[in-house]
């Protein structure tokens, strides 16, 4: 059974700081990993999707890396802004050929002006 | 492109009452999912549809939860009777249903409070 863990559960940083969010998963036989953002009272917005053949993906100030062998992914946010404040969740498919996602509990990020 | 539409946004009911949620996926998306997100947790899959057929409902509490997808488009999720532990956000998502997992889109969710 796939389990996803995210550390830390909450993080508070001053504006402008670079930060790293961590995600680990127990079954390394994944074919992709996604990072989502969730704002209070809202649904989930997909930020980055990394295929199993890729090592990293970048979008603007966001960079996500994937190390399948160690069961880890990191989301790097450069030059954080108050608008980055949200909960960040990582998710992996339930199993081979599945489109069902197993989520971590998320990291709640607060960027202080 | 219109997103995944869900209604209502909020619902408060008493325990043992019934409630229904509605979802309209992105046009052309074959796969539709219902997830339950309890406060402080990640979303957990309840049921997955492919067109109008059920792919997986192994985590759906079938004694009280039911779901259908009419004509392979809209979907409704019903709870009857509701329990206090059903308080959560119910998220609907859709995807094209093929390929690498791209195109997974969530709705804004329905926040259910059972008192």
Image (tube, coloured by chain):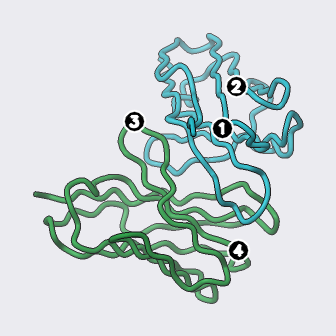
Q: Residues within 10 Å of mark 2 (few under 14, many from 20)?
A: some
Please give the chain letter of the residue carrying mark 4.
A
Label 3 or label 1, whichever lies nearer to me, is 1
Q: Is residue A89 left or right of residue B96?
A: left
Give the residue number, with chain letter if any, for mark 2.
B77
Give the residue number, with chain letter if any, for mark 1.
B26
Q: Which mark is residue A30?
A: 4
Tags 2 and 4 touching, CB below 8 Å: no
Does residue A92 lie above or below B12 as drawn?
Answer: below
- Chain B: its colour in the image is cyan
Q: Residue A64 at what x, y percent from top left?
A: 46, 76
Q: Which mark is residue B48?
A: none
Please give the chain letter of the residue carrying mark 1.
B
Secondary structure under tag 2 reads strand
Please give the chain letter of the residue carrying mark 3.
A
- Residue at 58% x, 87% y: name it: A70
Mark 1 vs 2, N-terminal side: 1
- Residue at 79% x, 43% y: name it: B30
Q: CA distance from mark 1 to mark 2?
A: 17 Å
- Chain A: its colour in the image is green
Please give the chain letter of the residue carrying mark 2.
B
Residue extending farthest to the left is: A113
Q: Same chain for the residues at labels 2 and 4, yes or no?
A: no
């Amino acid at each position: 059974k796939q389990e996803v863990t995210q550390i830390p559960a909450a993080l508070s940083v001053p504006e402008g700081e670079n930060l790293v969010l961590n995600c680990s998963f127990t079954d390394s036989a994944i074919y992709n990993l996604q990072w989502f953002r969730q704002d209070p009272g809202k649904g989930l917005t997909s930020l980055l999707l990394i295929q199993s053949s890729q090592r990293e993906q970048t979008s603007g100030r966001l960079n996500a890396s994937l190390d399948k062998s160690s069961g880890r992914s990191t989301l790097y946010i450069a030059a954080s802004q108050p608008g980055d404040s949200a909960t960040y969740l990582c998710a992996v498919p339930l199993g081979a050929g599945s489109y069902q996602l197993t989520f971590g509990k998320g990291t709640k990020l607060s960027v202080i002006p | 492109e219109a997103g995944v539409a869900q209604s209502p946004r909020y619902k408060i009911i008493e325990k043992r009452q019934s409630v229904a949620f509605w979802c309209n996926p992105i046009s052309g998306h074959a796969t539709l999912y219902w997830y339950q997100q309890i406060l402080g947790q990640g979303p957990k899959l309840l049921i997955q549809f492919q067109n109008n057929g059920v792919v997986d409902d192994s985590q759906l509490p079938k004694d009280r939860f039911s779901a259908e997808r009419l004509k392979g488009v809209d979907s409704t999720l019903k709870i009857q009777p509701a329990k206090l532990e059903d308080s959560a956000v119910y998220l609907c998502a859709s995807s094209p249903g093929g390929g690498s997992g791209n195109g997974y889109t969530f709705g804004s969710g329905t926040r259910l409070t059972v008192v």
